[in-house]
């Protein structure tokens, strides 16, 4: 089969489309014929060799965590899913013609494979953040970096739960945030003052790692009310860093429920063929994705 891989850490040029052995579904796993794979910043972070202590990578390595496709192998002990089912979920080396998933759910009928591949990781992250940050219905959550994959998920889950959101994004994404139910303002010079004019803030999420923890603490009045997924300086500010991926085991079921209620839609900004994974990484790394980018197989 074809898969995207890298044999050394480095820039996007280390990515190769190679012929590889097909993976197979061990116990408790399924294999899918991949139709689309989600692109996450962690994909290019691992390719660059960032945070190898937390995420050891054996070379050569495949790429990708999220995928949607058609089940073609069911491992021992797996029930409730059959060959031919359309599923989406998380696994490893998903930028490939076949991939093994460790968590999955049946795709809602109306979703395309491209759309479905965009949901798994960002929904797990968003549900985890809303649980850990400690914000209740009727309160207001400030989200720095609200227009990306995780932000788009956080805003819609919060809206569904009756949590008000103030989001920051670039000028081009202000209407996008408003369509997702948030009050919006731009980041950059004077941003904290603009947030203050929009209202009181009970808790804050830093999704962009743009060096704003000090302001988020001032706006909430307490470092413990601030949570980041992207700023490694968090301990210096007494702010919590959330990084335990996979700690919301029912995230896919909750995603399906939100989709069924029409409460969730994360747009795909761009889809790239498998052979153009490097372009997807370059565009993701530029840091201005609205919604999601995906690879189509
Ligand atoms: N620790 C964890 O568990 C975990 C899990 C998932 C992701 N992450 C990390 O969290 C970050 C976000 O992930 P993602 O998937 O949402 O990324 P993404 O889809 O690439 O989104 C990036 C967003 O950041 C916004 N942005 C850029 N500069 C900004 C600034 N100065 N202030 C505010 N927003 C700014 C962009 O908005 P504009 O286009 O409007 O500029 C864009 O929408 C990444 O660094 C990723 O590695 C961590």
Image: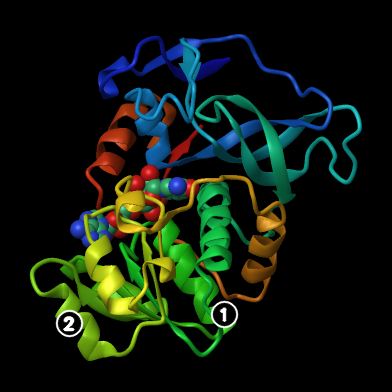
User: Is residue 282 left or right of 46 when viewed as pictured?
Assistant: left
**To which quarter of the image does residue 143 belong?**
bottom left
x and y, in percent, of residue 151 in the image: 40, 63
Q: Is residue 197 above or below residue 131?
A: below
Q: Which residue is mark 1?
A: 160
Q: Does residue 292 appear in this view?
A: no
Front position in the image: 202 or 58: 202
Front position in the image: 219 or 9: 219
Q: Does residue 50 appear in this view?
A: yes
User: Is residue 280 left or right of 86 when viewed as pictured?
Assistant: left
User: Is residue 79 left or right of 174 when viewed as pictured?
Assistant: right
**Residue at horizontal 23%, vertical 85%?**
196
Helix, strand or loop for disc 1: helix
User: Is residue 251 left or right of 279 when viewed as pictured?
Assistant: right
Label 1 vs label 2, nearer the camera? 2
Q: Is residue 83 above or below residue 11?
A: below
User: Which circle marks residue 223 in the picture?
Assistant: none
Q: Which residue is mark 2?
A: 194
**Residue at horizontal 16%, vertical 74%?**
191
Helix, strand or loop for disc 2: helix
């Amino acid at each position: 089969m074809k898969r995207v891989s890298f044999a050394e850490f480095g820039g996007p040029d280390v990515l190769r489309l190679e012929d590889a052995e097909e993976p197979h579904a061990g116990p408790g796993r399924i294999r899918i014929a991949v139709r689309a794979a989600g692109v996450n910043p962690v994909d290019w972070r691992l390719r660059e060799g960032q945070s190898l202590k937390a995420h050891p990578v054996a070379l050569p390595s495949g790429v990708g965590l999220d995928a949607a496709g058609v089940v073609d192998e069911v491992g021992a002990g797996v029930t409730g899913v059959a060959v031919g089912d359309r599923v989406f979920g998380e696994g490893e080396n998903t930028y490939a013609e076949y991939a093994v998933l460790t968590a999955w759910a049946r795709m809602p009928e109306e979703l395309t494979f491209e759309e479905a591949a965009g949901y798994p990781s960002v929904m797990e992250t968003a549900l985890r953040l809303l649980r850990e940050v400690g914000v209740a219905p009727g309160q207001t959550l400030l989200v720095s970096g609200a227009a990306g994959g995780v932000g788009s998920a956080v805003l819609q889950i919060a809206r569904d739960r009756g949590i008000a959101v103030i989001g920051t994004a670039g000028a081009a994404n202000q209407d996008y945030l408003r369509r997702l139910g948030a009050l919006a303002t731009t980041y950059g010079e004077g941003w904290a003052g603009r947030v203050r004019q929009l209202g009181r803030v009970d808790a804050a999420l830093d999704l962009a790692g743009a060096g704003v923890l000090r302001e988020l603490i001032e706006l909430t009045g307490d470092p413990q009310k601030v949570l980041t997924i992207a700023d490694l300086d968090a301990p210096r500010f007494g702010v919590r860093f959330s990084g335990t991926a996979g700690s919301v085991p029912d995230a896919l079921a909750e995603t399906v429920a939100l989709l069924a209620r029409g409460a969730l839609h994360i747009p795909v900004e761009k889809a790239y063929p498998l052979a153009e994974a490097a372009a997807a990484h370059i565009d993701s790394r530029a840091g201005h994705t609205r919604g999601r980018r995906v690879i189509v197989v």
